[in-house]
């Protein structure tokens, strides 16, 4: 089979890969994108409940988890959420702000994918779907063999994603390939993922499956106030997904079931104003009834409010505001929004995403050790990192041809 030549080969037709391709393509580079799924952008299509939370206007380095927390600053500064929003508005895609800074498509996530594909087409990008990669080699020229073709180029982009949501075709291929080229990899784990519990914790949580309420989840200095939902296996909801990325294996985290409440004062007022009320009735004014029925007997006993001592109220406050929970694990990559860990950013240029010791090799997206908060931050990392790589490929290509 005769090899086809181009300026850059992008492995992966997801958010970061398409962004890198369209930026380089529109700057005169011949770019080929290889996607093993039958359709590109499958994670884009399922994101945000099918409406794609395509960015967060407050994206900044402190909203990301990485062994090198400052790495993302350069890419984010040079391609901001507002820059991506300009592209969205150029394509007349209707959008709305669900919560402050959190932007969604008003119609469908397919609008974002169609936009990226149109931008790729404008740059003459070749998109090859449904092709499995069988071999990758490199030196001065990278050679990629698929089930349908052989491609050669002086630049190669690893944009194959991470391990989250394997039913969408996710795999560790990109990490394996990066390691083959000598790039160090930070140990990976499921991120933005529901937590599971065993023993006594599992027993009372299981009985509350489907119950939800706003909470504050914390680990160290990280605190997330948002919704939480009890599941048949443990805990989920935005606050839990957020904190899950920050909890080391085998460690506990904090949970405030009544953020914003001074529980001691509230319970003392109930004792004074509703002396004949029971604990369930009092707590039900603060939280869902099912949860109140589980917690009230444990914290307040079965006597009327008039009989509660200050010591009892202080203990109840501590239990409700400073609960410590030790997860037995997570629901794994099948339910994880993202993967934490990945290619060590110290091996990459923060300005170009190029491997420092392998000229022409770029790594973008989820395969890199950069994990954003829930709410559009990971898409913005894909856009910013892809943009940086695309610009660098174009500059490198023009320099080589000069």
Image (cartoon, rainbow, N blue to C red):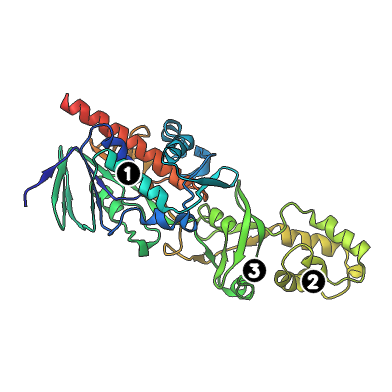
Q: Using the image, determine if residue 41 lies above or below residue 72.
A: below
Q: Secondary structure at mark 1?
A: helix
The residue sitting at the left extreme is: 1
Residue 321 lies in what quarter of the image?
A: bottom right
Q: In percent of the image, x 64 and y 60: which residue is there?
A: 324
Q: Label 3 crowding class (10 Å Cα cut-off): few <14, some 14-19, many 20+?
A: some
Q: Using the image, determine if residue 267 lies above or below residue 97.
A: below
Query: How many callouts does the rendering have?
Result: 3
Q: CA distance from mark 2 to mark 3?
A: 16 Å
Q: Nearer the viewer, residue 61 or 169?
A: 169
Left or right: where 27 falls relative to 351:
left
Left or right: where 199 falls relative to 382:
right
Query: Which residue lies under the disc numbered 1?
Result: 118
Q: Who comes first in sequence, dot 2 or dot 3? A: 3
Q: Nearer the viewer, residue 43 or 396?
A: 43
Residue 14 image label: none
Q: Position of residue 376 (x, y in %)?
A: 49, 47
Q: CA distance from mark 1 to mark 2?
A: 58 Å
Q: CA distance from mark 3 to mark 1?
A: 43 Å
Left or right: where 42 falls relative to 306:
left
Q: Position of residue 97 (x, y in %)?
A: 56, 45
Query: Which residue lies under the disc numbered 2?
Result: 280
Query: In this orientation, does residue 395 appear?
Result: yes
Q: Secondary structure at mark 3?
A: loop
Query: Which residue lies under the disc numbered 3?
Result: 211
């Amino acid at each position: 089979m005769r090899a086809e030549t181009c300026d850059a080969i992008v492995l992966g037709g997801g958010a970061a890969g398409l962004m890198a391709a369209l930026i380089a393509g529109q700057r005169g580079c011949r770019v080929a994108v290889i996607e093993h799924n039958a359709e590109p952008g499958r994670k884009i299509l399922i994101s945000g409940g099918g409406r794609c939370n395509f960015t967060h206007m407050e994206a900044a380095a402190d909203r990301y988890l990485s062994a090198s927390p400052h790495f993302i600053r350069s890419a984010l500064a040079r391609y901001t959420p507002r820059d991506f929003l300009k592209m969205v508005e150029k394509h007349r895609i209707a959008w709305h702000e669900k919560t402050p800074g959190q932007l969604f498509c008003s119609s469908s996530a397919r609008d974002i994918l169609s936009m990226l594909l149109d931008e790729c087409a404008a740059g003459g990008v070749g998109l090859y779907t449904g092709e499995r990669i069988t071999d990758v080699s490199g030196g001065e020229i990278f050679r990629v063999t698929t089930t349908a073709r052989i491609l050669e180029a002086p630049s190669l982009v690893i944009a194959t994603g991470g391990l989250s949501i394997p039913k969408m075709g996710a795999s560790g291929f990109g990490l394996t390939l990066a390691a083959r080229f000598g790039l160090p990899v930070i140990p990976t784990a499921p991120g933005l993922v529901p937590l599971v519990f065993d023993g006594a914790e599992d027993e009372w949580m299981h009985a509350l499956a489907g119950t939800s309420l706003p909470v504050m989840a914390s680990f160290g200095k990280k605190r997330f106030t948002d919704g939480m939902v009890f599941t048949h296996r443990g805990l989920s909801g935005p606050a839990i997904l957020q904190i899950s990325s920050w909890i080391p294996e085998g460690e506990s985290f904090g949970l405030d079931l009544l953020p914003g409440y001074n529980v001691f004062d509230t319970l003392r007022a109930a004792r004074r104003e509703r002396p004949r009320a029971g604990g369930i009735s009092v707590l039900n004014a603060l939280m869902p009834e099912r949860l109140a029925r589980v917690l009230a007997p444990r914290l307040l006993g079965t006597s009327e409010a008039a009989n509660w001592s200050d010591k009892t109220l202080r203990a109840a406050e501590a239990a409700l505001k400073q609960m410590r929970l030790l997860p037995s694990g997570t629901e794994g990559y099948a339910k994880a929004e993202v993967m934490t860990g990945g290619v060590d950013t110290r091996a990459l240029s923060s300005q170009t995403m190029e491997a420092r010791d392998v000229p022409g090799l770029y790594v973008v997206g989820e395969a890199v050790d950069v994990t954003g908060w829930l709410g559009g931050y990971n898409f913005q990392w894909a856009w910013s990192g892809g943009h940086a790589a695309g610009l660098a490929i174009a500059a490198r290509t023009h320099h080589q041809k000069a």
